[in-house]
Amino acid sequence: MAKEQIDKFQIIDHIGNGHFGNVFLCFDPFLQREIAVKVIKVTDPNKFVNAVKEGRTLDACRHKHIVDVKDVGTTIFRGEQVVTIVMEYLAKGSIQKRIEKRFISTKSACRVIQQALLGLEHAHNNNILHRDIKPANILFGDNDEIKLSDFGLAIDYHAELSNMQGYRPHQPLEVIEGNPMDKISDIYATGITFYRLLNNTNKLDFTFTSIEEWKKAVKRDRFPPRVFLPHIPEKVIKILKKSIHKNKGTRYQNCNDFRQALDRLNFDIDWVQVNEDYWTGQSNGDNYELIKVKKRNGWTIDFKKNGIRKTANCCKNVPDDKVETEFYEVIRKTTLR
Ligand SMILES: Nc1ncnc2c1ncn2[C@@H]1O[C@H](COP(=O)(O)OP(=O)(O)OP(=O)(O)O)[C@@H](O)[C@H]1O
Ligand SMILES: [Mg+2]
């Protein structure tokens, strides 16, 4: 059977759908390569203008940390008028999918955010607000480099006033209170994305029944809860807390300040959880392991470098109520230099 087509492109797979469009993996028969095509239904002229705008914004914001747009067009697809945004195909998918599938280390979380901030800073320098920064809108390139995507809600902040748009759990207090979105609300949303990466949280528990309830929780630092996984070093948590502070003026005021704070962290061992009792890490080509084992006289914590025990970080006879603290203390103090 002939493959279904979008314009000249042959559909290989459906890779994503959101509020605005469907994204397909396609084959370009002329260039003989895979590409991604976002298809946006346009029922009226306003929607047409908006859909085209997403493509134009991507074109105006070309950057190595922003998904590359190839073309914008219009066609009839499945009997309906659509706008197509043709983009480079990023086979590794979004960081949302990554959080769902595997453990994200503190170092990887920081690296994702540093690169996303480079892309976002470029957009901001071009007067563009993204307004929908979240894990599903940050993709991995072939070499795991980060690419900001989905500029469907982006606006020119000099030309348009921004009411609340985008994913509600990623909104800062001042926006919930009715103030327009701005660069600092994009930075807050990046901070919440950072929170989710560090804490390996694929979904925030957003169950408010009224705006008042939601506002109160954000005001009291209850949303998102200031609870952090025990392996995350204090210095990293400090940066995270500043990026999502309830007071706008206390937060990072631009992408560069946020990124530089992350740049100043000096990473040592990149620890990854294998299971509750076993973590592995890497630093400068050396392999590390941290293992806890229950023995007759309490717990033993073994720290190994390239398979050899390093006694300075090992403990014996650790009681049940101390073992977690001791174990994560080793991870925290060896994650950064
Ligand atoms: N260029 C691409 N390469 C690979 N996958 C992509 C690409 N663009 C988008 N996707 C996938 O498709 C999903 C939806 O794309 P996108 O976010 O642009 O659509 P959307 O309709 O605006 O989504 P939402 O409204 O949910 O944010 C992404 O989360 C991602 O998984
Ligand atoms: Mg999206």
Image: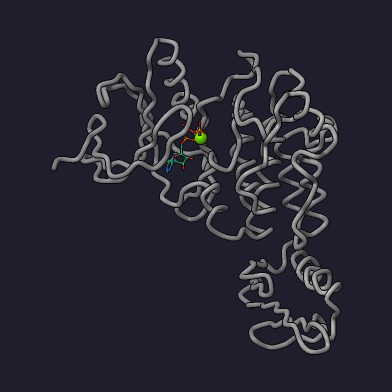
Q: Which color scheme did the rendering employ for the protein?
A: one colour
Q: Residue at x 21, y 41 (%)?
A: 29
Q: Residue at x 86, y 72 (%)?
A: 321
Q: Kindly give the residue lying farthest to the left in the view shown.
A: 1
Q: Is residue 55 visible?
A: yes
Quadrant where the N terminus sits is top left
Locate residue 256 relative to residue 4 in the image: left or right: right
Locate residue 64 relative to residue 3 in the image: left or right: right
Q: Position of residue 99 (x, y in %)?
A: 57, 53
Q: Position of residue 101 (x, y in %)?
A: 53, 57
Please determine whether, in this image, residue 105 is positioned above or below residue 243. Answer: below
Please determine whether, in this image, residue 213 is positioned above or below residue 161. Answer: below
Q: Is residue 110 visible?
A: no
Q: Position of residue 87 (x, y in %)?
A: 39, 37
Q: Position of residue 302 (x, y in %)?
A: 74, 83
Q: How many marks?
A: 0
Quadrant where the C terminus sits is bottom right
Q: Residue at x 27, y 26 (%)?
A: 77
Q: Kindly give the residue lying farthest to the top in the view shown.
A: 45
In this view of the protein, which residue sits in the foreground, 10 or 86? Answer: 10
Q: Kindly give the residue lying farthest to the front in the view shown.
A: 209
Please determine whether, in this image, residue 330 is positioned above or below residue 13. Answer: below
Locate residue 333 relative to residue 282 in the image: left or right: right
Rendering quarter of residue 225? top right
Q: Residue at x 68, y 82 (%)?
A: 305
